[in-house]
Image (spheres, rainbow, N blue to C red):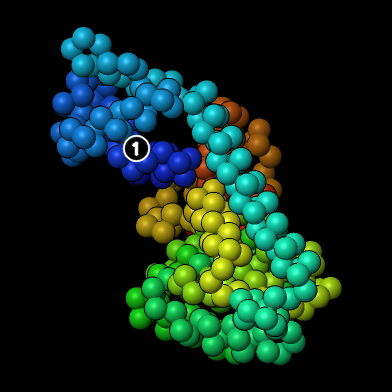
Amino acid sequence: MAARRVAEALLRLGVSAEATRVYDALLDCGPAALDHVAKLADLDAGDLASAYEELLGHGLVSAADREGVVAPQPPGLSLEVLARRRTAEIEESRLAVASAFEVFRRLGHPASRHDLVEVVTGPLIGIRMQQAWRTAREQIRQLDSPPYFDVPGGLDDALETLRRGVRQRIVYTRDSLTYPGMLKDNIETCIAAGEEGRVVASVPVKMIIIDDRVALVSLAISKADVVSTMLVVQPCGLLYALEELFEHTWNTALPFHDQDVGPRQLLPADRKLLSLLAAGVTDEEIARELGISRRTLYRRVEILSARLGAATRFQMALLAQRRGWV
């Protein structure tokens, strides 16, 4: 489990899969010759050399000595640099989308001339969303935030799409988790059926991307009560920018929760910690009750919050109760 989380973390920071496997192998065996690492990581000489050079460039491994032995290096500074680089990439994607949309706005709805962007308003929004969803063949990518358009049978459509083998990746905002009935009646049902869900604090736009063919874009929650409008974007520069925005958001979002971890698999100490938090017990009392330091307590709370996708301790206790963890 720990190795998988390390791998997911490095991938999210932009480290390649091959380099991640090499670093994971070095964490298991310590300083080792590169040919031995290649066997552990199941890589050929070419892939190993490329992965090693990547890790060396990131400062995550030492330079090989005369015998070809390398070792993992303290990751603190390297991880900070990687995190800043990913943040910069996300900001570039955000600016690209904003710039593309501004060009669209200045040109005065080019959809009327080129059929690249169509503006949909009112009751037609739900209808067009349902129509597009049902045409999915390979994957659906979505940035989700309330309030929600009325789409009758939307949950049934989502479940049917999953049964057809269409991959669904959805990034929820924390407002989604606390929206009345959304978590229990919709999100958890879809995740149990195979949907891949992650959580972020907020999203700049709400959107659904169907395969690589069309994107449905509406305003984020702060503006949704002002203008009830949706853009239907056909393949063009704006659609490609929206795809990049989704991928960057997905890569930096927290897993909705460990989908292979049920209440019976929780550590007894974690179950007790959640119960004490739900009861409103202070940090000092919880640490004393569990026999751990406050620093360890904060780390455990941080890990459990990430697994649950919670922004606050109140949300963490609420989500833990809803999932039967306490």
95 shown above or below 169: above
Foreground pick, 138 / 154: 138
256 shown above or below 227: above
Residue at 37%, 28% in the rendered image: 55
Foreground pick, 240 / 203: 240
| Residue 58 location, quadrant | top left
Q: For the view shown, which residue lies furthest in the right direction?
A: 226
Foreground pick, 94 / 227: 94
Where does the image place residue 321, in percent across and percent down from the top left?
A: 56, 61
Where does the image place residue 127, in percent across and percent down from the top left?
A: 62, 89
Where does the image place residue 128, in percent across and percent down from the top left?
A: 60, 86
Which residue is tagged 1?
20
Left or right: residue 22 compared with residue 13? left
Residue at 54%, 62% in the rendered image: 240
Where does the image place residue 111, in percent across and percent down from the top left?
A: 67, 79
130 shown above or below 217: below
**Number of numbered labels in the structure image:** 1
Can see residue 104? yes
